[in-house]
Image: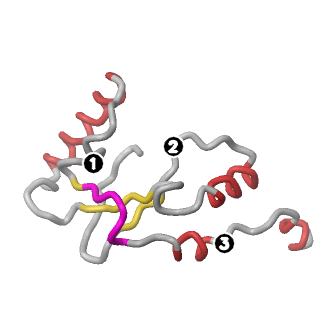
Amino acid sequence: MNENNHTSKERFDCEALVSELNIDHGHYKTAEKPYGTDVTLSDNIQQSVDQMMQQWQHGGYFTNDSVEWINFYPGEHFNDSHVTKVAEQLNVTPKNVWVSAIRPGKCVPYHWT
């Protein structure tokens, strides 16, 4: 198949999206507060989160400061047009969108989200 057949839609420019992100303005998340305080979870989701948190505790992630990530959200930290473009290319409807960054020396343990 000719590679040009795959370019009928405009390619997603990941570098353009990343260039809009400012590491100092994202939402910082930690093992103790993976969802911050601004999110209300349904009972069944909260149960899954509680299980995940127990696994993290058992794994020792609460005894040091190595767990940290930064979430960036469309419309707040980067242009919504990036989400629209990807959704159109994949023929999907976005439900919950963010971009995460992990700084050198930090980690994010396995989790279901």
Q: Which of the pair 50/16 is nearer the observer?
A: 16
Q: Position of residue 12 (x, y in %)?
A: 69, 67
Mark 3 neighbour class, 10 Å CA radius: few under 14, some 14 to 19, many 20 or more: few
Q: Which of the pair 79/58 is nearer the observer?
A: 79
Residue type, label 1: Pro
Q: Quickly name the residue at label 2.
A: 96
Question: Of helix, strand and loop, which one carries label 2?
Answer: loop
Image quarter of residue 24: bottom left
Q: Quickly name the residue at label 1.
A: 34
Q: Earlier in the sequence, mark 1 or mark 2?
A: 1
For the residues marked 1 and 2, what is the alpha-carbon distance in whole angstroms? 15 Å
Q: Quickly name the residue at label 3.
A: 13
* Residue 28 colored in magenta in the image: yes
Which segment is the magenta one? 23-29
Q: Earlier in the sequence, mark 2 or mark 3?
A: 3
Q: Position of residue 88 (x, y in %)?
A: 75, 51
Question: Of helix, strand and loop, which one carries label 3?
Answer: loop
Image quarter of residue 37: top left
